[in-house]
Image (tube, rainbow, N blue to C red):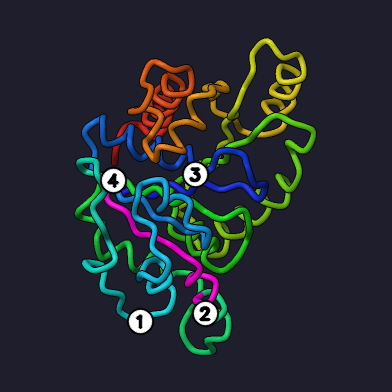
Amino acid sequence: MRTIAIINLKGGVAKTTSSINIAYILTQRGYKVLLVDNDKQGDCSRGLNRRTQDGDGIDRIMVDRHPDMDNLIHHTDYANLDIITANLGLLTANTEVIKDPIRPQQDRLKKALQQVSDKYDFCVVDNAPDINVSVINALTAANDVLIPVEVDDNTLEGMDELLNQITVVREELNPGLKNIHCFITKYQKFNQAHLQGAEIIEERYPTMKTKIRFSGVVARSTFMRVPVALHSPRSAAAEDYGILVNEYLDMIGGKE
């Protein structure tokens, strides 16, 4: 199983939309995918109609010595796509992890995912806009990191700090972290500011060629809690996410 961490310290850049659609499109390519909601807000869980206020999810992985993965993994409405959910219980769990003086803190998600690595081809982890202990766990478990970036006045805010943290994790905790790439979201190709902003991003950071164009159907698909790739497969965003997944698969040389 290959694990992809979707992360950016900036909110509103389409992390959850990207996580859901990348995961869904991978299933359409014939792969079995586990989606992990690693944000206490639970937006990814909500987007797949699996969010609960108090149900067990990734919080148990962070706290329990032997998490019951069979109980924590839920089927979604889509074939070959399962999910580990999140809610505000993750906030308490992260606090407990930090206070734990005995057990290692950074590899709990990695160990849990190893229990089910033979059941899935890919794991996609949707992360909070933060560097907390559960996000560090996601980076420790990841083979690849994809960073959605929206072109606006604050495009690069926090980017250098994020990349520095990822580098530290790779050097200290996860030498198996192979690829770290940005990809541009909500792109307007006729907007001069977007053209210039994209050039700056591509010059400064390793960036995927595929840009996810802005499309109004994304908001509608989010409201309906359906992947945009299914809700409106001919929309610009859906087409671009499909191309992005193809580019990613080419980048890694196909599934390991």
Q: What element carries label 1?
A: loop
Q: In this view, does 174 lie above or below 232?
A: below
Q: Is mark 4 on a helix, strand or loop?
A: strand
Residue at horizontal 20 percent and vertical 55 percent from the top = 118
Using the numbered discs, state the Cα–Cα distance from disc 3 to disc 1 in whole angstroms.
28 Å
Disc 4 marks which amino acid? Val
Q: Does label 1 or label 2 sit earlier along the sequence?
A: 1
Which quadrant, please, contains the C terminus? Answer: top left
Q: Is residue 36 above or below residue 244?
A: below
Residue at horizontal 40 percent and vertical 41 percent from the top = 20
Disc 2 marks which amino acid? Val
Query: Where does the image place residue 217, in percent across and percent down from the top left?
Result: 48, 25
Q: Read off the residue under disc 1.
A: 65
Between 206 and 23, the one lying in front of the other is 23
Nearest to viewer (mark 4 / mark 3): 3
Q: Read off the residue under disc 3.
A: 16
Nearest to viewer (mark 2 / mark 3): 3
Q: Does label 3 or label 1 sit earlier along the sequence?
A: 3
Using the numbered discs, state the Cα–Cα distance from disc 4 to disc 3 in whole angstroms.
15 Å
Using the numbered discs, state the Cα–Cα distance from disc 4 to disc 1 in whole angstroms.
24 Å
Q: Read off the residue under disc 4.
A: 33
Neighbours of disc 3 within 10 Å: few (<14), some (14-19), many (20+): many
Neighbours of disc 2 within 10 Å: few (<14), some (14-19), many (20+): many
Query: Where does the image place residue 97, in percent across and percent down from the top left?
Result: 52, 79
Query: Where does the image place residue 94, in percent across and percent down from the top left?
Result: 54, 74
The stretch of residues the image draws in magenta is 82-93
Label 2–label 3 contact, CB within 8 A:
no
Q: In this view, does 123 lie to the left or right of 155?
A: left
Neighbours of disc 4 within 10 Å: few (<14), some (14-19), many (20+): many
Label 1–label 2 contact, CB within 8 A:
no
- Displayed quadrant of residue 72: bottom left
Q: Read off the residue under disc 2.
A: 97
